[in-house]
Image: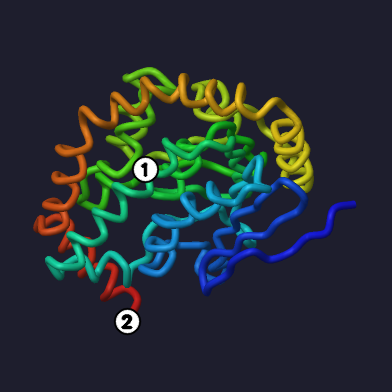
Amino acid sequence: MAHTTTVTTNDSVVVTAEGPIRTITLSRPDNLNAVDAAMHRRLSKIWAEIADDPEARAVVLTGAGRAFSAGGDLGFMSGHRDPDIRWRVMEEARRIITEMLHFPLPVVAAVNGPAVGLGSSLALMSDLVLMADTAFLADPHVLVGLVAGDGGSATLPAHTSLLHAKEFLFLGDRVDAHTAVARGMANRVVPAADLLTEANALAQRLAALPQHALRDTKRALNQSVELSFAAGRNYGLAAERYSMTDLDHHAFLAAEERRTVE
């Protein structure tokens, strides 16, 4: 059995190595792995770091505890009132999408629980998506007064029909694991207890394949997604940044801040 070692760690993201497999774990389990400023910044850099690891051949992306990621946390979103923070966050968002699309290794998302907002985007930007039978996808950007410009609008039409993509992003409803597979948003449903075992077995299969052929096949397949992202990213990301100043979004933040105080 290969020895497991921790490659990098901070308060919110842990990367471990087992042979040729690198596992990225979103690790704020007490907050359902909601994305804070540190996690967002880390996710914009981690892909290039692993790509530079000559021993890495495949990646598993998952969450600690009972969630994959609950999306942006309230403190992170509240900080977007500051214009300098808005610019930095949207530049990080651009890097996350670009780095994942250009990342040469195959990424297996092991969606162990709720994958919401950016959590949903991270899953859908992976190459293969395994979902626990208890997991779901949701993207409530519009519900909280934000434009869904940082991943969902770019990648969803590549996976599912434009009608399903619009329904998912407009309404923000939960899509359970079986429905996600039926709509082309995930590859398969796995019993929750077996999810990481299945994801690691799949990553091992990918790691054993001829690497140049696999990586260039991934690049070829991602060309259409990259073209779609390039066509819409300036508008989508700019629109999301400006929606952070919208009265509807500020009303949502104020209501959530009052609720947390109460």
Give the image location of residue 257, x and y in percent: 27, 74
Give the image location of residue 161, x and y in percent: 38, 18
Residue at 51 percent across and 55 percent down: it is 49
Residue 191, placed above or below residue 159: below
- Secondary structure of the residue carrying tag 1 is helix
Which label sits on residue 97? 1
Q: Is residue 86 left or right of residue 119?
A: left
* Amino acid residing under circle 2: Val
Using the image as rendered, state which of residue 26 and residue 5 is in the foreground: 5
Q: Is residue 160 left or right of residue 251?
A: right
Give the image location of residue 131, x and y in percent: 62, 38
Q: In this view, does 32 lie to the left or right of 234?
A: right
Q: Quadrant of the C terminus?
A: bottom left
The count of marks equals 2
Residue 51, placed above or below residue 228: below
Which label sits on residue 202? none
Residue at 56 percent across and 30 percent down: it is 186
Q: Earlier in the sequence, mark 2 or mark 1?
A: 1
Residue 160, placed above or below residue 18: above
Residue at 36 percent across and 33 percent down: it is 168
Residue at 18 percent across and 59 percent down: it is 87
- Secondary structure of the residue carrying tag 2 is helix
* Amino acid residing under circle 1: Ile
The quarter of the picture where residue 169 lies is top left
Location of mark 2 (residue): 261
Residue count near mark 1 (Cα–Cα under 10 Å), binned few <14, some 14–19, many ≥20: many
